């Protein structure tokens, strides 16, 4: 497997884009990545696009080919991939493997979603396609319900409190204020969070990420093309994908997602690193309690201590375990297919030392993208090239 570099990145803002069609968002982000790289678009040999619900929400499929057409690319293979909320992360991994294996020298990974135009019932029905509707679907259980149950169990087992979980929200909303791409940065306190509308006990409105429109893209090239890249490149040290249960009953413990644990272990193995080597993390905080569960599953924080770390300020920028300096899904937003590649975008800025909420001396970054009830997970490890 060859060295793979991220040569260019691009992203739209995450939020509402009422005047942009879904393919236009993807083309905008991808064009930015290509232009930043300094490479000719004729050198791109494959395109992988992550998207989850364009069919039910926009009535448009075949997005990979449409985006390639909008970019003026040649008759290259163009593939849409879907893995619920992990769709973007999977697209990135496919592009990485295409380059690392020698199949091509340059591949484009794009993620996109357009959601905010649809009403709540329609969006909820579309997102619920990410569960096994033959079993969990008929029970009426939604994803807030799943994470509400996980919170209850974590609290009973480890003493996790409302105030500790609120610290995650406060941190990520504050981080979002520093990110020009974020949808819902805010200065918000524990009282406001606790008094926001109840969604699914104990989850309240501010514990949940917002629906979003948006796109992100990265251009990946072989390591020997470094001299042709205009932007500061970042090395991909590892890219792992795993499967977990598609059914809630398939999880032996709702306080952990086996797919995350396995993906993290595989990524650390590929990179020859451990969790202690990671300087910052962009992880999948679709709900506030998810950041706590994910941080423990990734081996970043000892089991049962994720909530305490947040309350103690240890997961803030400047703490010993910076998590979601971008604002995460809670603040930046969650345009489902774009999220995994959006995490890569934020991490590249950190490793270049140009992020608006910069982690000091960042050398190694990790991204984590989880789909459905944990049915799909990707973990990537990126490295500053002079590290």
Image: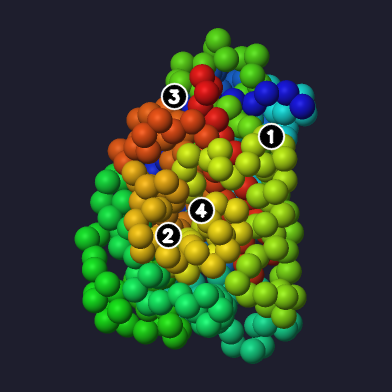
Q: Which of the numbered marks, if any, corresponds to residue 104?
A: none
Q: Earlier in the sequence, mark 3 or mark 4?
A: 3
Per the image, the residue denoted by label 3 is 36
Q: Residue 254 location in percent, x, y?
A: 63, 75
Q: Which residue is mark 4?
A: 283
Residue to which mark 1 is pinned: 272
Quick one: label 2 or label 4, which is nearer the N terminus? 4
The 10 Å Cα crowd at callout 1, few under 14, some 14 to 19, many 20 or more, is few
Task: Name the residue nearer the viewer: 317 or 20.
Answer: 317
Question: Whole-Å distance between the Cαs marked 3 and 4?
Answer: 25 Å
Q: Which residue is mark 2?
A: 309
**Residue 131, picture quadrant:** bottom right
Q: Nearer the viewer, mark 4 or mark 1?
A: 1
- Mark closer to the chain start, 1 or 3: 3
* Tag 4–tag 1 contact (CB < 8 Å): no
Callout 2: SS: helix
Q: Give the mark nearest the N terminus, 1 or 2.
A: 1
- Asked if the residues shown at circle 2 and circle 4 are in contact, with their CB atoms under 8 angstroms apart, the answer is no
């Amino acid at each position: 497997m060859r060295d793979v570099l991220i040569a260019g990145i691009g992203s739209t803002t995450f939020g509402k884009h009422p005047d942009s069609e879904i393919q236009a968002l993807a083309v905008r982000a991808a064009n930015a990545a290509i232009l930043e790289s300094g490479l000719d678009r004729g050198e791109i040999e494959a395109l992988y696009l992550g998207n989850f619900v364009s069919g039910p929400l926009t009535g448009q499929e075949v997005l990979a080919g449409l985006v390639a057409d909008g970019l003026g690319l040649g008759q290259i293979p163009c593939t849409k991939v879907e893995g619920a909320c992990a769709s973007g992360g999977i697209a990135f991994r496919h592009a990485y493997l295409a380059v690392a294996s020698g199949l091509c020298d340059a591949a484009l990974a794009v993620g996109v979603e357009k959601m905010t135009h649809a009403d709540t019932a329609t969006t909820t029905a579309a997102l619920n396609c990410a569960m096994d509707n033959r079993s969990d679907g008929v029970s009426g259980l939604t994803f807030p319900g799943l994470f509400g149950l996980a919170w209850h169990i974590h609290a009973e087992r480890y003493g996790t409190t409302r105030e500790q979980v609120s610290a995650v929200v406060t941190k990520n909303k504050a981080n979002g204020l520093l990110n020009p791409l974020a949808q819902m940065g805010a200065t918000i306190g524990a009282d406001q969070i606790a008094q926001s509308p109840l969604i699914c006990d104990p989850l309240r409105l501010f514990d949940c990420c917002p629906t979003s429109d948006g796109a992100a893209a990265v251009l990946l090239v072989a390591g020997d093309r470094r001299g042709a890249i205009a932007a500061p490149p970042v090395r991909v040290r590892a890219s792992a994908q795993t499967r977990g249960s598609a059914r809630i009953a398939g999880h032996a413990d709702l306080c952990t997602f086996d797919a995350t644990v396995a993906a993290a272990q595989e990524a650390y193995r590929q990179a020859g690193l451990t969790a202690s080597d990671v300087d910052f993390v962009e992880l999948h905080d679709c709900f506030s309690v998810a950041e706590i569960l994910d941080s423990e599953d990734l081996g970043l924080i000892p089991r049962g201590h994720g909530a305490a770390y947040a309350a103690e300020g240890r997961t803030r920028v400047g703490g010993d375990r910076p998590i979601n300096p971008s604002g995460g899904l809670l603040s930046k937003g969650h345009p489902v297919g774009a999220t995994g590649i959006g995490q890569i975008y934020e991490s590249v800025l950190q490793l270049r030392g140009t992020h608006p909420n910069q982690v000091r001396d960042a050398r190694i970054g990790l991204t984590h993208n989880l789909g459905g009830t944990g049915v799909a997970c990707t973990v990537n490890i990126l490295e500053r090239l002079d590290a």
